[in-house]
Image: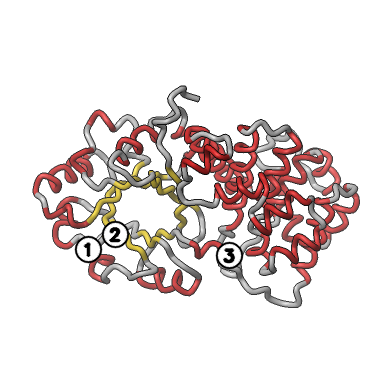
Amino acid sequence: MSADQSSFPLAGLEAVANAQHQWVALALTPAPGPDAWLAVLRLLGYPDVGAALAPLDCIVTLDEPLRLLDEHMGALPSSRVVLRLPAGVLAEAPVRKRCTELVEQGYRIVVDGEPGVHGSQVGVRGVTADCAIGLPSALALMSLPGPHWARNVPGAARLAVCRAAGMTWFSGPYEREPMPEKGDGTARKRLLALLGLLARDADSRELETVLKQDPALSYHLLKLVNSAAFALSAPIHNFGQAINMLGRRQLQRWLQLLLYARQQDDSTANLLLPLAALRAAQMEALCKQQGGDRDRQDMAFVVGVFALLDVLLSMPMPEIVGALNLDADVASALIERSGPLGELLALVEQPVPEAERLAALDLTAEGFWLSQLQGYHWAIQVSRNL
C-alpha cells in the first residue's frame, strides 16, 4: 500500500443489475467533497482495477463534464465507463459540445432528470432516477435507447413498476427484501440441516445424505466442480468425488454460497448469491489486513455469507443462529453487529465507509478499497461459475 494514507480517497461500489438479476455494472460513489472527481480518477487509476471488476461497466458521476480531459481517459476507458451527468448541465453549449466529443470517443452517457431536446442531440443513451421518489417521464424513456437506470428501488413491488415503465438497470435495497416461503417449508428445513452440519464440521457422508435430498443444490455442486474454475481432466459424477476433490475448507465455503444459488420462480438469478460472495470475500480480506490468522479469516468469511440468511430463509436471525449453534463471536456479529467481526460486518454494509470507523478498526482507506476490489472480483467469478 502507498505511504500517504491521509490522502487516499474513500468510496463505495454498488452493484447494478438487469431485469434477469444479473450484475451488469458497478456504480462508484466517492465520499462527498470538492475533490470527488479527483478521487474518481485516482480510484479508477488504481493498479489492476480493470481486471478486478471485468467484465462489468463502471458508472461514474460527472457533475461538471468539462472537467473530463483527454489526459484522464487512461483511467476511464470508454469501453468500460458509463458517465452519469445531471440533466441540467446540458443547457450549456460548451457542455453539449464536450458531451458530443465524449460520445464520439465511445463513452455512454446517462442523465439524472429530464434530458429534453438536448439529450438526443448530444447522444445521451438513457436516464436515471431515484425510483423511490419518482420515475422519469414516458417521453424520456421512449425517446432514448437506454440503458435506463432505476436507483434506490425499495422493494419487489416498486421493481415491478420500474420494469413496466421501461427501466432496464436496477439497484437498491430491493435485492435484500425477504421473500415469503412457498410450500410446506421442507426446503428451508433441509437448508438449516445442511448449515448445521457445516457449522459442526460434520462427516462427508452426512453431508452427502442431505445433498441427495436436495436436487437443486446437488445440481449446482456438480456443476461447480465440473466448471472451468477447477479445470479437471475428467468429469465428476457423484457427491463423494466432489467432496474429496474440493477438500473440507473449500467444500464448506462453496456449499455456504450454493445455498443462495437457487433460481427464482421466474428463472431469474438470485441477487443474494453475488452479494453474499462479496461480503464474505471482503470480510475475509479485511480480517487478514487486521492480522487475523487463517482460522479467524475463515470465521470472517462465514459471517459475511451468513449475514443474509435471514433474507434467504425469511426467518429472524436469532432463530437461525440458535438453530445452528454458532460460535459466540459469529452469533454476536450476525445478531447485534457487535464484537470485532460484527464491527467489520457493519463496515462492509455501509455505502461509503467513514474514515473514523476505519481508523478505529486499524484499517486504511486504501486497504478498504483493495478489499472491495477483491470482494467484487470474487463475487463476479462466483456468479459465473454458479
Amino acid type of the residue tagged 1 in the rendering: Glu
- Tags 3 and 1 in contact by the CB under 8 Å rule? no
Q: Is residue 211 visible?
A: no
Residue 286: x and y in percent read: 60, 38
**Residue that badge 3 annotates:** 267
| Left or right placement of residue 373 versus residue 223 in this view | left
Read off the residue under disc 2. 127
Tell whether label 3 touches label 2 (CB within 8 Å): no
Disc 2 element: strand
Q: Are marks 2 and 1 in contact (CB under 8 Å)?
A: yes
Please state the total of marks drawn on the protein image: 3
Of the numbered discs 2 and 3, the one sitting upstream in the chain is 2
Residue 356 shown left or right of residue 307 in the figure: left
Identify the residue at horizontal 69%, vertical 69% (top origin). Answer: 315
Q: What's the mark number on residue 114?
A: 1
- Residue found 48% across the figure and 33% down from its top: 366
Going by the numbered disc 2, the residue's amino acid type is Val
Q: Can residue 303 be seen in this snapshot?
A: yes
Say which residue appears at 48% left-offset and 39% top-offset: 53
* Residue at 49 percent of width and 69 percent of height: 155
Q: CA distance from mark 2 to mark 1?
A: 7 Å
